[in-house]
Image (tube, helix red, strand yellow):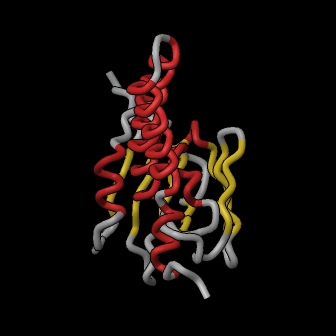
């Protein structure tokens, strides 16, 4: 018997980074108000760092879609690899040309990663380890995270381009 409902536990775990940041901020504020000299400066620094962690944690929490999807995602040294039950593949992050969010055929949307050399790599948003894609997408030049998160948490009807590389001019 558990004190929390399963849905509440899942929600808390989804936003764990933001909750940790809130705790760090509270400790920092306490030290800033109660401390003198260096302790007060340390507390202020902790409060600011905690606030930044809250902001990043909320974004990461909105990106996490669960881990009940098919397959496993690994990101190692600039390469995204997806091991799916039927298909899989890998994409080098530096060679990405386009990232799309597809509503998919079933209930789970999919990330579609396009590069120049092969077929698009389709990764369910709720695959195990898919939350590591947040850092990959955040590292892409010109990506806008807030619209991406808004699209991800809406009811998509059609495929949406999240990011596209800048194509060089021909003249």
Image point (46%, 21%), residue name: 35
- Expressed as whole percent of the image width and height from the top left, the position of residue 101 reads 40, 62
- Looking at the picture, does residue 120 appear above or below residue 146? below
- Expressed as whole percent of the image width and height from the top left, the position of residue 135 reads 53, 43
Image quadrant containing the C terminus: top left
Residue ranking furthest to the bottom: 1
Seen from the viewer's position, the closer of residues 54 and 60 is 54
- Expressed as whole percent of the image width and height from the top left, the position of residue 148 reads 34, 52
Seen from the viewer's position, the closer of residues 18 and 127 is 18
Q: How many marks?
A: 0
Image point (36%, 51%), residue name: 162
Image quadrant containing the N terminus: bottom right
The image quarter in which residue 32 lies: top left
Seen from the viewer's position, the closer of residues 8 and 82 is 8
- Looking at the picture, does residue 112 appear above or below residue 164? below
Image point (50%, 62%), residue name: 14
- Expressed as whole percent of the image width and height from the top left, the position of residue 90 reads 67, 54
- Looking at the picture, does residue 97 appear above or below residue 106? above
Image point (52%, 48%), residue name: 20
Is any part of residue 163 visible from this angle?
yes
Is any part of residue 97 visible from this angle?
no
- Left or right: residue 75 compared with residue 111: right
């Amino acid at each position: 018997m558990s004190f929390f409902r399963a849905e509440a536990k899942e929600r808390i775990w989804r936003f764990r980074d933001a909750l940790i940041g809130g705790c760090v901020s509270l400790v920092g504020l306490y030290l800033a108000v109660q401390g003198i000299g260096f302790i007060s400066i340390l507390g202020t620094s902790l409060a600011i760092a905690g606030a930044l962690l809250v902001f990043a944690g909320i974004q990461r929490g909105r990106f996490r879609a669960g881990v009940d999807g098919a397959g496993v995602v690994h990101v190692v040294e600039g390469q995204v690899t997806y091991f799916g039950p039927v298909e899989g593949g890998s994409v080098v992050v530096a060679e990405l040309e386009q990232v799309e969010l597809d509503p998919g055929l079933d209930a789970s949307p999919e990330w579609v990663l396009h590069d120049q050399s092969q077929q698009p790599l389709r990764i369910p948003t709720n695959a195990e380890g898919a939350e590591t894609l947040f850092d990959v997408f955040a590292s892409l030049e010109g990506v806008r995270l807030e619209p991406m998160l808004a699209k991800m948490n809406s009811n998509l009807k059609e495929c949406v381009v999240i990011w596209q590389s800048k194509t060089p001019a021909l003249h």
